[in-house]
Amino acid sequence: MPRVAVYNTQGEQVGEIDLKDEVFGVPVNEAVLHEVMVMYRANRRRGSHDTKTRAEVSGGGRKPWRQKGTGRARHGSIRSPIWRGGGIVFGPHPRDYGYEVPKKVRRLALKSALSARVQEGKLLVLDGLELDAPKTKEMVRILNNLKVQDKALVVTGEKNENVVKSARNLPGVMSTEASLLNAYDVLRHGTVVMTRDAVAKVEEVLAG
């Protein structure tokens, strides 16, 4: 059973917490992590690229020259795909790249990602995170106290508007609530900072 230190917002250790093996101590399954990361990235693609067919390009309303007698090949429109400036035959059109993997696979990927952060010593647990008002400077102070040097994912038990607004202007820092936690966000950020109640919620959902 992994045991990690618990800190306050001053960066002082105030205790320790035992993490459940079935959530934070599973073997890291790299194949599943790769599969889920590809899915999340595919789901984020806009798929808005588009090319024009011969029906969409401008011009070509008349036959460029008569059918016979010119010695040249017959043509019906200068917007034909074989003409410069003509339509594109098999070009891309707007589409949805999204797909889903089974829920059990996504859950296993999240467990693997969290376990990897624990093994690396990159999972920090906060005793609590309450901000009186949205203040970016306060979030910077807390992260500095915790000696966070890389990208950070701040996870709270419930949605906390003050935390969200305090973190959203910081490059490389993202905040989320425990119910929205996913493997993609965990792997994109080098350090995961979780409150005690966020740890309890994640364990409640994933340990079942």
Image (spheres, grey):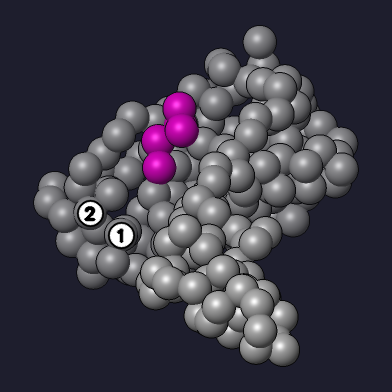
Which residue, as the protein is rendered here, is positioned at the far left? 133
Q: Nearer the viewer, residue 119 or 1?
A: 119
Q: Nearer the viewer, residue 43 or 116?
A: 43
Instruction: For the residues labelled 2 and 1, say whether their Cβ atoms are less than 8 Å apart.
Output: yes
One can see residue 6 in this view: no
Q: Position of residue 59 (x, y in %)?
A: 39, 74
Q: Position of residue 166 (x, y in %)?
A: 25, 58
Which residue, as the protein is rendered here, is positioned at the far front? 69
Q: Secondary structure at mark 2?
A: helix
Q: Left or right? Give the position of 48 relative to 163.
A: right
Q: Which residues are magenta?
A: 176-180
The amino acid on which the numbered mark 1 sits, given as a three-letter code, is: Arg
Residue, disc 1:
168
Q: Residue at x 52, y 63 (%)?
A: 54
Q: Left or right? Give the position of 42 relative to 25.
A: left
Dot 1: within a 10 Å radius of its alpha carbon, few (fewer than 14), some, or many (20 or more) residues? Answer: some
Q: Is the C terminus in the top left, top right, bottom left or bottom right quadrant?
A: top right
Q: Residue at x 32, y 44 (%)?
A: 129
Position above or below: 74 against 26: below
The amino acid on which the numbered mark 2 sits, given as a three-letter code, is: Lys
Residue, disc 2:
165
Residue 179: in magenta span: yes
